[in-house]
Image (spheres, rainbow, N blue to C red):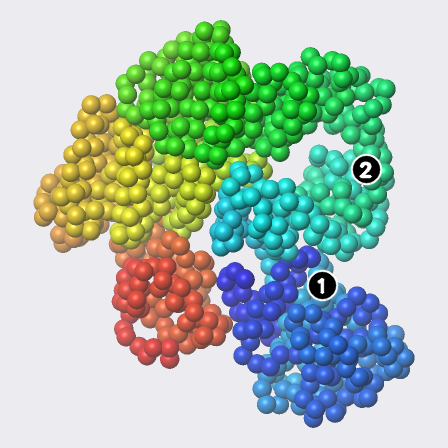
Amino acid sequence: MPEEPLTAAAGLLRSAGCLVVQGPWGSGKSTLLAALVADADRPVLRLAPQPGDERRPFGTLTALAGQLPPTAAADLPAALRPVALPDRVGTLHPAAVPDPSSAPATSAAVHPSAADPAGPAEREAVRLALHAATAARPVLLVVDDAQWLDPATAAVLAHARRALAPGRLSVLAAVRGAAVPVPVRQLCGDHAPRLTPAPLTVPQLADLLGAAGLPRRWAGPVHRCSGGNPALVRASLAAAGPARADGPALPGSVGDAASREAERWLETVPAPVREVLLTAALSEHPTLTLLGRLTGPAASAARLREAEDAGLVGIAPDGAVAFAADALRAAARGGRAVDPAAVPAAHLALAAAETDPVHAVRHRLLGQDPRDPRAPHAAADAEHAAALARRDGERALAAELLLLAADRVPPADRTARSRCLALAAADAAAAGRPDLAARVAGAVRAARLGPSEQVAALLAVIDTRGQALHESDALIARARHLAGDDPVLLAAVHLRDAVRANIGHGRPHRAVRAAALAADLARSGGDRVLEAAALTMRARMERVLGDPASARSLERARGLGVPVSRLGVRGSPDYLTARHAVFDDRLDRARAVLLDLLPAAEAGGDAEDVQEVLRSLAEVECRSGHCARALEWAGRALRHRSVTGLSAGPVSYTAALAETAGGAFARAAEHAALGLRVAREEHDLVFTSRNLLALGTVRLATGRLREAAAALEEVAALEAGQQVGDPTVLRWQPELAEAWAGLGRAREAHALLVSTRAVLGRGAPGTGAEAACLRAAAAVSSQLGEADRARGQLRTAAELFAALGLRLEHGRTLLALGGLERAHRRRAAAREVWDEAAELFARCGAAPWTALLDALAGRSGPTAPGGPARSPLPTAGLTGAEDRLAALVADGLTNRETAERLHLSVKTVEAVLSRVYRKLGVRSRTELALALRRPVPERRGRGH
């Protein structure tokens, strides 16, 4: 159970004396109740009503008798003390309790009237019983599945609770669904606090997968499959355990297991609701309007609202209907309870109701038998619809339509089948859909098509593997064998080999050779598109190696005049031009080119093209100090990744950059840590280095120098192993030199800076990389006692950053300069420099840097009225609950005072504080205060 919701729930229950936990099926309500019960400091009475109990007077109350002390139970009427039968309250109550269904006549006899479900005698009896039960100690009453609580039980328990002294009887209830039934409101009160367990997030799923020994890169696919619903997640992990864990895609068995479990969720709504959900699940873009055409607007809307209340779907303001999990959608259209004959009938009904001609064709094809005499005509319709979908950027839909077309082509027409499957392979690759690419490859094999079709299908499978290209060796070897002597086919294979050599093996020299060979083969085969792509790849790798030939290779690619629409964005010389502008700090130029490319990427429908442009735009805005824009672009990239299922390694790096610039250091560290774990699993050396750099930068900023140096030293080793020769591409050297200087390793830092600046002087003088080296050199000079030299280096660096428009780096340099001035007791000079930095950070929207400056300058951050002072320095790696607790302890509160302030037990405070110490690498309250940059509190009694 994640600590944050448990801490919040415990605080609400302790402060209000009651808590209603509500949410859909499988959302973790019972798990949360169990965790709260395990941590309870008082006796617990447990009730778990069953379906139908809500219609039986005192159907739930009878379960209480077996749990009361004999003296308390004696106050109950005999009718409320039936003979105990085996357990009916599931995991929360191991004791035997009575089953009211075994004595319906008795239960009815104690029910005075429908208008008054509990008479005075029953109310008084229960009050006396609970008074006796709570005489010695307060008691916690736990009601799981309280949606089935009967009104009579609720009435007598509510009466008893009101009659008891405050705090003697706390109530914890769990309710399935969005609405809280009247009996629960009667028991807990209309103003009782409510808590809905949040779905598990992608980072939480990554941790769960890692703990289970499974690839963390599956976190995104598992999240889409399960919607973060804990019950579906458990089913997914159980199925993933025996599955093959080294493949790039989530095994199909995981989705199947989650779908089977999702059928139980669907069973919580009536059959008419499931019928509407079947139709919604078959539609690509279900809406209230579309579904209303089939069953009537009023009936359809009412049933969908019921599904929404059950958490099965969400309905947007514009009427769009979205399933809470892919597994729910799969279960709704193909579960065991679905009549197979109903599916084609629903497709044909949707074909008649659909106004989009492309989707109408899709539904018509799926509703017809492929052996229908009209199938050849349907194949032509499908090809035309696929072309329209491709034009509008819906490449996955285009691939599906072409697969349907290929199934309907006459057996003798191999040319048409080959054409459909070749186009389907390209569309599946562009959509980043390994499932569709695998279907295409299977269809090509089944049709025994020629080498060109087989190579195209294999390359599509490779292209959908994203960053996990280390697993493509066998596929590339197979494709090379099938290509034979065909220069164009060989060129396409060698181009993928170049990409694999860079990302999967970290061998840019080999990548250059493979790209050069691909360009030569494409030229000999007369394929200008492939030649331009290969030359662009060659130029990219030459720049990484610091080879001046990069500019010539890029110019050759541009000279071929191939439009971006034919090349794809990320393989085009236009995109590489923008990336080189980023490296050279020509940010206005980079931004202009990228903004021109974004519409082309979106129109082309290539998932990786869109992702690359969004990420690059975020990086440009980080560099230029437009932090809000950087966060916006990074947010779009994260959302795009969640929909497309691309690797989390690259987008996590981008999110870490944006959060470091304008969000929070803690979130930046979380993103970088996730990206690092995924990149390592995928053997993606490129983004292993980048995420390590992002993590090292956060640790450096937050004063965790040893951890910063460790991360950055690993970057240095990786870059050396890959023989990266251009320091402007990934600027780790100044960060590592600054960390080393802070650790007293000035000589090593100086040597690193000398070698780095020598390379920059040959190829990139006057860049931001040069200015960053100057700032790091100042840290070295300061360590060597050369304050005047350090001051001059920082001022020169600040001027260079300002001239380049690198506002955030300019502010960081002023921050360092102010620290130097204060260290030498030049307080007025420090204040002046820091005021300038504060103004610059404010204009940038650089929230974490503003907080860091406030901490160093001793300024007060904003505090909530009546709340504890907030740490002005966000601490990487801590959860929100841990950060709040750490701030109180660092301010001098004892464990007991902290427990009272946060409404926790002292035991919980001690456990959380131990985690904080471990995460921050501290061993005492004094070290914690220093880590949070607080004044060291006076020593007080430990835990008292």
Rate crowding at label 1 as few (under 14), some (14 to 19) or many (20 or more) other CA atoms within 10 Å. Answer: some
Q: Which residue is mark 1?
A: 180
Q: x, y (%) of residue 258?
A: 66, 49
In this orientation, which residue lies closer to the viewer: 624 or 828?
Answer: 624
Which amino acid type is marked by label 1?
Val
Q: Which residue is mark 2?
A: 343
Cα separation between marks 2 and 1: 35 Å
On the image, the x and y values in percent for residue 156 come to 76, 80
Q: Residue at x 18, y 33 (%)?
A: 755
In the rendered structure, the answer to whether residue 1 lies left or right of residue 688 reads right
Q: Are marks 2 and 1 in contact (CB under 8 Å)?
A: no
Image quarter where the C terminus lies is: bottom left
Image coordinates for residue 43, horizontal then vertical, percent: 60, 81
Kindly identify the amino acid type of the residue bearing the numbered disc 2. Val
In this rendering, is residue 925 above or below 490?
Answer: below
Name above or below for residue 724 compared with residue 413.
below
Taking 215 as reference, is 773 left or right? left
Whether residue 494 appears in this view of the structure is yes
Residue 60: percent from left, percent from top: 77, 75
> What kind of element bears circle 1?
loop
- Which residue sits at x=27%, y=57%? 858
- Visible residue check, residue 731: no
Residue nearest the viewer, comparing 445 with 159:
445
